[in-house]
Image (spheres, helix red, strand yellow):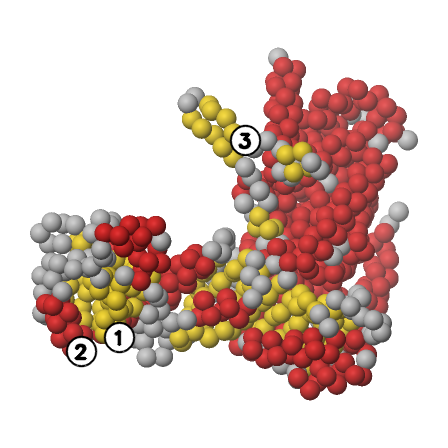
Amino acid sequence: MKKRSLAKSLFLVFFLTILAGFIALPSKIFNYDKPAIDFYFLGRHIYKDYQLRKGLDIQGGMQVTLEAMMDGIEEADRLTALEAAREIIARRVDLYGISEALIQTAQKDDSYRLLIELPGISDPAQALNLVGQTAELDFRLQQVLSEEQMLEATMSPQIWLDSFVPTDLTGQQLKRAQAEFDQQTGQPVISLEMNDNGRELFATITKENLNEVLAIFIDGYPIMTPVISSPILDGRAAISGAFTIDEAKNLAIQLNAGALPVNIKVLEQKNIGASLGEESIQKSVRAGVIGLSLVLLFMILYYGYLGFVASLSLLIYAILTIALYKILGVVLTLPGIAGMILTIGMAVDANILIFERMKEELRSGHSPERAMELGFGRAWDSIKDANLASIITALVLINPFNFSFLNTSGLVKGFGLTFLLGTLLSLFTGVVISRLLLRAFLPLFAKKLIKGGKS
Amino acid sequence: MNLMRYKNFYFAISLLFLLPGIFSLIFFGLRPSIDFTGGSALEIQFAQNPENLVFATDSGFQEILAANYDYSVLQSVGEARVIVKGKEINNQEKDQLIETLEQNYGELELLRFETVGPSLGSELLNKTFIALLIVAFSITIYVWRQFNELKYGVCAILAMLHDTLILLGAFSLLGYFGGVEVDLLFVTALLTAMSFSVHDTIIVYDRIRELKRRNPRASFAEIANAAVLETLSRSINNSMTIIIMLLTLVVLGGESTRLFAVALLVGAITGTYSSTFTAVPLLLSWDRFFRKK
């Protein structure tokens, strides 16, 4: 009975390792492409293609910290303005075609900041222009298009965009935009309120262009294209459309950003060329592989059969780690790789503790099987206590709640994350998997162990 | 074998390593990178170098550079590659500088360009102190609670302080004699070294606690000595594997994480030493001091 459950667990470990190994393999080995996970199961399409995500310092790119200049903006509106600036920048970056850009807001005392990571950017001046311009809102009237023009417009977005003619009404005349529910229909609407200056202009435009499209542009890009259904004389307009309340809120935020231009200043800027990271990662990976082999050799030379089992679980550890990085989408930075290499050295710690304990128990006359179980049991307390200190430190480095009084740098977080994952995973492989493997392999070399333990 | 009889000898070894570092920290301090002070850093790779110039020491290059940029550090790394650090400059000024250099020395690649505003630098210093305090404080509380006696917590932290000071001292000396700077990654290494230190100390203390429970009549000194003997080979073997990994990273790894790995390596070595030869002797001294009273 016991043997059967052991066999089952072993099979599970074996299966897990194979699966993880498959995920961990690079997608291209020499000339062979690895097939992606792509199959139908119970009528569901399952497709997974895990990739290692490379940090800025590896693939090259740009990291900027911007400060939003909040003078002249009321205290209560500052966070909204910052959030709006983030949205605007995110949209610009998106339009610009940068994938996997990261844009975060942060507040530190009186300083409102945007942390931006743009992978693959090689021209920082151009990127800063893209990101740092203040948002501009304006209203544009759509010209009536001929049928031929219509056809062209559906083919080319540029021609369609060009069909809108700017009016004098801009974000400067917008007092406030807000997402609300229409009191009669209950639908979400966006209400616009113009200031005194804009009210007259708004009235003139809406009177003269009834039933035409008055589009709202932000940064030269149309946000909405409502049709004027009646003249608006009081400077208040409600725009209804097929949007949810959340979408309406987002649009209102963006409109407010147009109305509240935030000037932006560069606090910090880091540009890394792609070649620098490429060079470092090759060296680091080579160092990791050589180090790993040396540790395996050391364990086998020093602990013999036991060391062989520890080596096996260390290999499983390495495979699981890489698979986990891919599944969780851990962004790999150079310090992160250093953290991973470090945890390989630390991962055998649990095994060493256990083996030393086993030796003691063997010396005091227990059978190898008993010594093993005792060794695991007794060593577990120390292992657990000692690793908690590592976990505390890793959490301070990762700063999971983004406390503004702790570090927010991606590099430090990258190291902290691999350090934390390594510590947790090594507890699993060092204790659970090693124990299973030992239970399975111990009968093969138990006799030799007794001799070794006594010498 | 009574290892703990040579307690004072171990303290002397610690002092031998602590004193030069502390001396250096007081008189030379640390060399902060632009992460802390604010400023700009450029890493430039020249495509060709027909005259085999060593850029960092070439007076012609220094002159051209100085005319265009108020720099404070100029280093050669590898072949035809330089790192320049100095006053904060913006993108336009940087482009101008690169253009001038290209006119004089041909095609080049800007591998890295970093600019940190001065306010962010001092902020990082605050964040570093807070992180150090949080780690030290939470570990003391944890060890204290875990072992039910204040002395364990305090001695573990003293051993950690010992390791921290040696690491800081080592980088102060490296900074004074080798121009090595401390940056954000050094802070990370420092925090990690702190956790190494406590990690090993807890393993030894754990054994002391266990032996005390099993042999209630033995003296504290006997127990401490037995605990050290029983954990010594584990401690050395475990450090061996960590040191193997870090050494390969220092020797074979990339340039950008080399000093980071060196800092971790120093931390791993002192952490191993201190858990056996500082943390336990401190515990014994504490025990003797308060028992006499």
Residues marked 3 and 2 touching at CB (< 8 Å): no
Q: Where does residue A376 sit, x and y in percent of width and height?
A: 69, 32
Q: Nearer the viewer, residue A263 or B252?
A: A263
User: Which x, y percent locates residue B185?
Assistant: 65, 63
Q: Are marks 2 and 1 in contact (CB under 8 Å)?
A: yes
Residue topped by disc 3: A37
Looking at the image, do the residues carrying marks 1 and 3 touch, with CB atoms under 8 Å apart?
A: no
> Which residue is drawn at the image coordinates 29% and 64% (left, top)?
A217
The residue tagged 2 is A197
Say whether residue B280 is visible: no
Instruction: Determine whether B118 is above or below A305 in the image.
Output: below
Where is mark 1, residue-wise?
A: A172
Neighbour tally class for label 3: few under 14, some 14-19, many 20 plus, Cα within 10 Å: few
Q: Quadrant of the N terminus of chain A?
A: top right
Task: Give how far apart the Cα atoms at labels 3 and 2 are.
Answer: 61 Å
Mark closest to the chain's N terminus, 3 or 2: 3
Name the kind of residue labelled 2 in the image.
Answer: Asn
Q: Residue A70, can we see it?
A: yes
Q: Nearer the viewer, residue A30 or A400?
A: A30
Same subunit under labels 1 and 3? yes
Q: Give the answer, above or below, for where B188 lies relative to A196.
A: above
Element type at mark 3: strand
Residue A103 image point, x, y percent: 46, 60
Which quadrant of the rendered structure holds the C terminus of chain A? top right
- Chain at tag 2: A
Q: Nearer the viewer, mark 3 or mark 2?
A: 2
Chain of residue at mark 3:
A
Which SS class for mark 1? helix
Tell me the kind of residue under disc 3: Ile
In the rendered structure, the residue with mark 1 lies on which chain?
A
| Residue at screen point 63% across, 14% down | A4
Residue plotted at (52% across, 29% down) = A38
